[in-house]
Each structure stands twice: as C-alpha cells, then as structure tokens.
Image: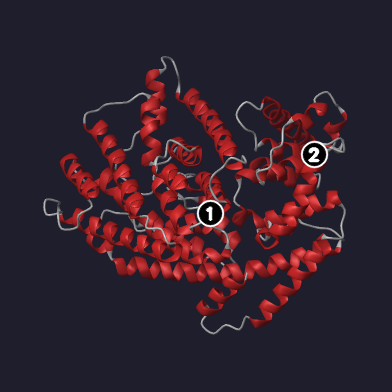
Amino acid sequence: MGHFLQAHSASSKGQVIGDLQVRHAKKLKELKEALANIGENEQLIAVDAMQRLGVDYHFQEEIEAILKKQCTRASGDEGSDELGVVSLRFRLLRQQGYHVTTDAFNKFKNNEEFKVDISALVGLYEASHLSFPGEETLDEAGRRSHQLLTDWMKNNLDDHQASAVAYSLEHPYHKSLTRFRAKNFLNNFEGKQKWVNVLRELAKLEFNMVESLIRNEVQQVSKWWKELGLTKELKFVRDQPIKWYTWPMACLADPSLSEERVELTKSISLVYIIDDIFNVQGTLDELILFTAAVERWDIDATGELPNYMKICFKALYDITNETSYIVHKRHGWNPLESLKKSWATLCKAFLLEARWFSCGHLPNSEEYLNNGFISSGVPVVLTHAFFLLGQGISKETVRIVDNINISSIISSTATILRLWDDFGSAKDEDQDGNDGSYIACYVNENQGCSDEDARAFVVHRISEEWKFLNKECLSASNPFSASFTKLALNVARMVPLMYDYNSQHSLPSLEENMKSLLSDSFLAQGLSNQRSQA
C-alpha cells in the first residue's frame, strides 16, 4: 500500500493525506489481528468479504494460510455437511488455484432439506460459475439452484432477501468486476462482529483513495490523447479516450498499477483507431499496404501509404517503442519483437475480414471465429499487459504469449469478447463500417436455423468458453502470474458491459457502474458525451 500512497500523494497536488494513511494503517492492523481470533467458517466469510470489497491484496499471506487449512479440511473427513459452507469453501479454494473436486456436492443431489436454505442455494449458484469442462455435477447444481431461486422469488417478492437473490442471479461474483460491485456489497454487508465493522471502515477509506487515483489517471489519459492529436488529422476515427480507459481501470484494479493502467490505455486506443481504418476508411488496396508496413516495421518505408495511414503508423510505431522501452527499463526484458508480432497479427486478421467483405464471402462459423478472436484486439492488448505487468516473464511464458493458440487464457478471453460483440443487437457507436457476424455465419451453414436459435447457441458457446478459461486460469499448472491471470478474467468480465448497447447506441450498464464507483458522475458523463464523437 505504501507504493500506492506515495503515488497518490505525488499526484494529489498538495492534498493532505497523512491522516488517511494513519487511519488506513490502523485498520489494516486491527483487521489482521481480528482474523486470527475468529472461527474457521467465519474466516471463510471474512475472506469472501475482503475479496468482494477489493481489499484482499493487503492480506495475501493471511488468506493463503486460511485457505491452506481449509483445503486440508475439504480433502479430509471433516468436510461440513452444510451446503453453504461447502459451496463457499469450494469457490474460494478454486479461485485461489487449489485442486478441488466437485465430489463434495454429490451428497446434496437427493437432499430435499437444502431447498429451503436460500443463502445456501445462492452459494451453490455462485460456486457453479467456476466449473471446468466436463464437470456435469457442478453444471447441474447451477441449473437446479437457479431454478429453485427463481421459483422462490416468484412467491417471496417482498422478502428482504429477494433483492439480494435477484442481484446474485444477475451478477454472479465470479463473472462480475469487483471494482463495480464493491459498493453494492458494502451497502448490504452487515454484522455485529468487530472484524465486520473494521473491514467496512477499511473499505470506505480505500474507496476514497481509489476515487482520487482514478480522477488523476483520467486527467493523464485525456492530456496524452489531446497532445497526440490523432482526431485532428483522422476525422473518421472514434474519439473516446475515457471509454478506452475504463478497460484497464476496471480490469487492473490494484491501486499500485496506476502507470500500467495509463500505458495500457494507449495500446487499447490504437486497437480502436486501426479498427476504424479497416472498417470505415481504408480501401482494400490501402489496407494491404498498411498491413505490409506494420509487418516491415520500418518508419522510413511508408512512402506508398496515404497520408492518414502514415499518421496512424507513426503513432503506432512511437507508442509501441515507448512501451518497449518502459518494459525493458523496469523488468529487464525487451518485448519489442513480441509487440510488433502482435500488431502484425491483428492487422492480418483485420485484412482477412476486409477481403471477405470486399468479395461478398461469408465464411463458415469456425473459420470466422478462428480469425475473429484475433481481430477482437484482445490478444494484442493482453500481450502488452503481460509485459507491462512484468511478473513471470520467461522464455516459456513469452513463447505462449507469442503463440496465442497455445493458451486458453488468451484465446478464450478473446473468443468471449468476439461472441459478445457479435451477439449485441446494436452496432458500435456511430460506426458506419461493416463487420462480419458469427450469428450470420452460423445461420448460413445450418439450414433451417433461425436467428433466435443462433443466439441461443452463442449463449451456450460463451458459457463453454468460460469453462475453458476457468480451467486454464484456476489450475495449478497455469504458468502465468496471478496478476496477469486476474487481468484476463477481468477482461472477460468486462465484456458484457462494453457491448451492452441500447437503441441510442449508448452503454447504460457501463455508465451506471461508473456512477456507482464515484461520488459524482463526471466519468459516466464523459462516457455519455463521447457517444456523439466519432
């Protein structure tokens, strides 16, 4: 936390935060002492609460010690007969990468008593979202608990639990972003225990510091974007730096990663700009030349490009080299070759889609998706993020990042984004270009299939990709750092918010989440204002 407070202090223009530091440190100490003096089941509840409030990074050693002990209980004969405890223990252990099977749930299959325990059913439903491919027991538990909870709500609309149950069904924790859900959890987090009150106070202090940090980062991003000046030269591209910043803001939630969030926003902006070049402005011949220029990566060999492409390529060249310099200086590894390769791969995927459109070719659904997960932009962004985070960089992990089909951490995250993007009923804001659609490809190759059938299949496909992503991220064999793994999961969690367009081409869910995150709506207002700028 010291790193965060120093950065916060330096960027707050004279704000006095000494008292805040003292209070924060005091609450940290009090909570650590309290954790050591509560029962094992209550420790599970405390760990869950810390994670939901986004303060768990202060307590990694304590959490690891608690879960290690719980893992021993789960694998022995001491496992609890209570469904709620079994579900919570399973979810927390699997989230942490422990090897846990679904066997503990078998004893509840024919147990009718748990149907009346609403909290336990919610816990079971939450746990079901961490299933791996082939875990039918957990899949069935998810379907059954969802149905039981839905039926219960029909007859208990006035029950004080009803709103909490509805919220959990709509926003299961594993597939939600902590940054956007923490305040809602805090508002409903109650208890007479001392640790509950201390944790509530700690979370409030954290929220205040994070809010100020976000404001400072928005100012940095806005200043950088204005000075870059691309929208003055390229009138057709989107002008949405605040929207682009929301990706790293929500997905890299650790307060100490302020510089990484700002740097990653720069790479994300280029994905959107290059996407506009391919979808809105460029002719096929121009796009072929631009892709070749990116593959050559020679700033002095762009003479044949039209002027608007020269401007874009120079920005790409400069920002990528700047990122490489930062990574090499901080972490001792020069990622330039990997970054260059990621941009070339993205442009080739964009170009293939442009070729399909120019000749009226509709590929089959798998051909489309195999290219579409690359053109989603996720692989290039995660490649930049991997190096900016700087943890776990080795020849093996770099090899995996450079070959995106090897690891589901990248490919499944990207596939989830591509399917969600195509699933949306409204087009992206003010974009007049033409993209392909997985749904159109699927309907075309399946005679008699309706759009509704295709949409149902997409929902199923997204669910299956989540299982692959879970297995890759939450298994002990995962070669990547915890920070990169969490980022990939958070990108998948962010996707529904970023592609939930309404008929006015806005993102109401995202804007509402921004309002809940900050004490006023300046960031949400910024998102709203950018709808008309493209």
| Res. 290 mark | none
Mark 2, Cα crowd under 10 Å, few <14 / some 14-19 / many 20+, is: many
At x 72%, y 67%, the residue is 202
Residue 57: x and y, percent? Answer: 65, 60
Give the alpha-carbon distance from disc 2 to disc 1, as whole Å. Answer: 31 Å
Near-viewer residue (518 or 487): 487
- Do the CB atoms of the residues marked 2 and 1 lie less than 8 Å apart? no
Please tell me in which quadrant of the rendered image residue 223 appears. Answer: bottom left
> In which image quadrant can residue 93 be found?
top right
Within the image, what quadrant is residue 200 found in?
bottom right
Viewed as shown, does residue 92 lie left or right of 375? right
Q: Which of marks 2 and 1 is in front?
A: 2
At a point 28% along the width and 62% down the height, the residue shown is: 318
Q: Which residue is drawn at 44% across and 61% down?
A: 242
Q: Mark 1 points at which residue?
A: 251
Outermost left residue: 304
In percent of width and height, residue 401 lies at 43, 45
The quarter of the picture where the C terminus appears is bottom left
How far across and how far down the image is residue 371, in percent?
Answer: 36, 34
Which of the pair 345/71 is nearer the observer? 71
Image: 222 above or below 180: below
Amino acid found under the numbered disc labelled 1: Cys
Q: Residue 74 carries which label?
A: 2
Q: How far from the left and from the top, in percent, is residue 491?
A: 51, 48
Which one is nearer the viewer's eye here, 54 or 95?
A: 95
**Looking at the image, residue 294 lies above or below residue 404:** below
